[in-house]
Image (spheres, helix red, strand yellow):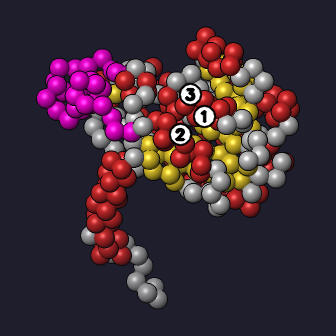
Amino acid sequence: MAQRTWLITGVSSGFGRELTEQLLERGDRVIGTVRDMGKVADVRERYPETYHAELLDVTDTAAIHELVERSFAKLGRIDVIISNAGYGLFGAAEELSDKQVEHIIATNLLGSIQLIRAALPHLRAQGGGRIIQISSYGGQVAVAGNSLYHTTKWGIEGFVESVAQEVAPFGIGMTIVEPGGARTEFRYGSAQVAQLLPVYDQTPAHSFLKMLDPKNGLAPGDSARMAARIIESVDIEPAPLRLVLGSQALESTIATLRKRIEGFEAQRDLAASTDFPPGE
């Protein structure tokens, strides 16, 4: 297998860390971004020739462009871009502060958009490549207490689905990864929680509290197996637009889409009633 070069954002933990470890172990090169170099000191020590650590805050658009420019200039070719940086935010919409709302959009949505936009000219110039956007089955399914997280995931999925059509003629494939719950720091460590209001305590808005407590059962997803499937997807041609990981995620997505289609089907007469009559 030929050595590939990957640029991955947010590799200090979770899927980013797991992807990085697996890729380096098999002999690939990884440019992995973090906000704290100390969290990847061990990786740098074990793979000094093939792991290139970079500091990056994905809310800094200028820094994203500078990193991408420098990385392509230094390594010549980057085969795969994985937009992975992001975090969870839980709480009813009115419980969230303005700062929390703005920051998660700047990180999960705008940061991903700007990374992809920065990479496209380079991928076109080299004759193709692959972009993988880490989303969530929460990019298709919405539940109470996750409104702003869903905002970012639904938003980035629409962006990627459109851009995938724009860049396919240049040999650039794009894949949206929609994992279900996994046993990572994303779920049990790094997720942020709003300042909760007692009025929501007995409502669906606070049902996430049970999910975040490991004593109520761990998530079914294995991050190592999920990372392996993501890596394998790069060899699939054409690039799969979506990759759903986890049986629970798939079943929930299918049930949600079926219900949505039923709702649309029920509106056939209503939708047609707003058209001009034939010949008019």
- Answer left or right for 136 relative to 7: left
Q: Name the residue: 76% across, 41% down.
A: 3
**Nearest to N terminus: mark 2 or mark 3:** 3
Residue type at numbered disc 3:
Arg
Furthest toward the left, the residue is 202
Q: CA distance from mark 2 to mark 1?
A: 8 Å
Residue assigned mark 1: 22
Residue plotted at (68% across, 19% down): 46
Quick check: 9 left or right of 70?
left
Q: Residue at x 81, y 28 (%)?
A: 70
Indicate the position of residue 155 as horizontal and vertical percent values.
49, 44
Marks 2/3: CA distance? 9 Å
Q: Is residue 101 magenta?
A: no
216 within the magenta span: yes
Query: Counting residues from the N terminus, which is met first, the one under dot 2 or under dot 1?
Result: 1
Q: Which residues are magenta?
A: 192-221
Answer above or below: position of 115 versus 67. Answer: below
The numbered mark at residue 227 is 2
Q: Position of residue 93 (x, y in %)?
A: 32, 30
Q: Tag 2, which secondary structure?
A: helix
Image quadrant where one finds the C terminus: bottom left
Camera-near label (2 vs 1) is 1
Name above or below for residue 229 compared with residue 69.
Answer: below
| Amino acid type at mark 1 | Gln
Residue 75, percent across and down?
83, 33
Q: Are marks 1 and 3 in contact (CB under 8 Å)?
A: no
Binning the other alpha carbons within 10 Å of mark 1 as few (below 14), some (14 to 19) or many (20 upward) gives some
Q: Residue furthest bottom?
A: 279
Residue tagged by mark 3? 17
